[in-house]
Image: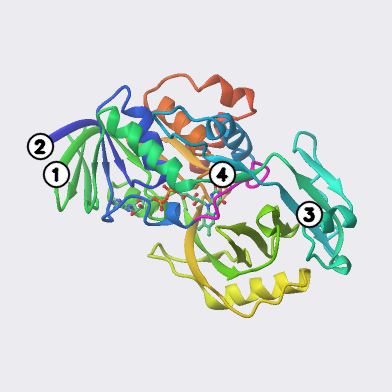
Amino acid sequence: MADFDFIVIGAGIAGASVGAHLAAKASVLILEMEERPGYHTTGRSAAAYEPNYGARPFLPLSRAGLAFYKNPPTDFSERPIFSRRGTLIIEAKGQEEASQHFLKPGSNLREVSVDDMVALIPVLRRNYANRGFYDDGTGDLDVDLLHRGYLKWFKQRGGKLDCNAPAKEIARVDGHWQVVTPQGTFSAGAVIDAAGAWGDKVAMMAGVAPVGLQPKRRSIGVIPISGHGFMDWPFFEDCAETWYAKPQSGKLIVSSADQTPVEPHDAFADDEAIAVGIDRLMQATTLEVTRLDHSWGGLRSFAPDHFPVCGYESSAPGFFWLVGQGGNGIQSSWGLSRLAAALALREAVPEDLLAHGLLLEDVLPARLRK
Ligand SMILES: Cc1cc2nc3c(=O)[nH]c(=O)nc-3n(C[C@H](O)[C@H](O)[C@H](O)COP(=O)(O)OP(=O)(O)OC[C@H]3O[C@@H](n4cnc5c(N)ncnc54)[C@H](O)[C@@H]3O)c2cc1C
């Protein structure tokens, strides 16, 4: 039976990124149930970098990755992963309360007037908005390049990736984890649960109590759009997060920011949710949407407090959680994966994460076990 220091379950952005760091110091096997990595949530994001978005720990974890995404080493990616695109958060009429928390110190958001907003998004209806908040430090992430970069490093550093290899049984035998897959049985000192929406299912397979992970479906519609200059529009949304839109690959993506609790599955778009998103976009702008180009759905998975879960499970030696990235798993991947690798190797937390304000107790699974 092949033996490793670590077996990582799941080859989405979480598994690939932690695998890349661990493989520099340890023997690592990544098991992926699908025939290719990135098929589930990682391949279905909105590809946005907006570090103000999400629960408290995501801000430092995302900010810590910006320099890397802007200028990755050439053996990771020949091209930058980040391209600049501002974010405009619009306070619609009646949303005065929802926007209270946006102007906080260090958030990089500045208040902008209706005139400023119309200059950014010429189709915006003047009577829709009271005011807005603009962040010029945000951008688009090339998710495919980022994910492939992590996998490239992982393989260069001696890591082994097995696809079509769902973990079917996980058991602790003589102080080692044994993972049974259709490709064979593998053993390791530690198992890293990076199974995304299936995180709790994998834990239960290993006899570990779930942390209460809830996958929530989000649907995105892609609409054709013509005219000059729209590719330069910022990511734009209302401040209550009831819809958002963003130019992407010559089209506009739109969502009603739906978050329907579901069981883990191969997600598909909810047509009704997309129709609601398009309707809200048309209320906010003068755009006339008559056709949907295509759509997709994906699962964003949340711990009960919406913070990520990263660290060893105290009740099960060698069982490590790396789940609960919600809507932030791409932008936080550089920070979170370095944290996860350090904790898995029982090394010190990277200084830059602490300097960005990360509180370790926010991410450790122990907080959910009280
Ligand atoms: C519509 C949408 C928009 C989003 N927009 C953004 C955004 O703009 N910015 C951002 O940062 N984040 C965004 N996200 C969130 C981000 O995509 C996720 O946080 C991230 O992809 C989660 O990565 P993951 O590796 O944990 O999960 P996944 O990519 O789902 O990977 C988990 C893997 O585990 C595998 N697996 C499960 N069970 C087993 C098993 N038993 N054995 C072997 N393998 C198994 C699965 O096949 C899967 O490949 C968005 C998500 C959605 C759905």
Q: CA distance from mark 1 to mark 3?
A: 56 Å
From the image, tell me which residue sits under label 4.
307
From the image, tell me which residue sits under label 3.
120
Magenta stretch encompasses residue 50: yes
Q: Residue type at mark 1: give it.
A: Thr
For the record, the magenta segment spans 45-55
Q: Residue type at mark 4: give it.
A: Phe
From the image, tell me which residue sits under label 2.
1
* Rendered residue at 60%/30% (across/down): 359
Q: Nearer the viewer, mark 1 or mark 3?
A: 3
| Element at label 4 | loop
Q: Residue type at mark 2: give it.
A: Met
* Rendered residue at 56%/69% (across/down): 221
How crowded pointer 2 is (Cα within 10 Å; few <14, some 14-19, many 20+) is rated as few
Q: Nearer the viewer, mark 3 or mark 2?
A: 3
From the image, tell me which residue sits under label 1.
185
In screen coordinates, is 320 left or right of 99? Answer: left
Quadrant where the N terminus sits is: top left
Label 3 close to label 2 by CB (< 8 Å) = no
Q: CA distance from mark 2 to mark 1?
A: 6 Å
In screen coordinates, is 313 left or right of 336? Answer: left
Label at residue 248: none
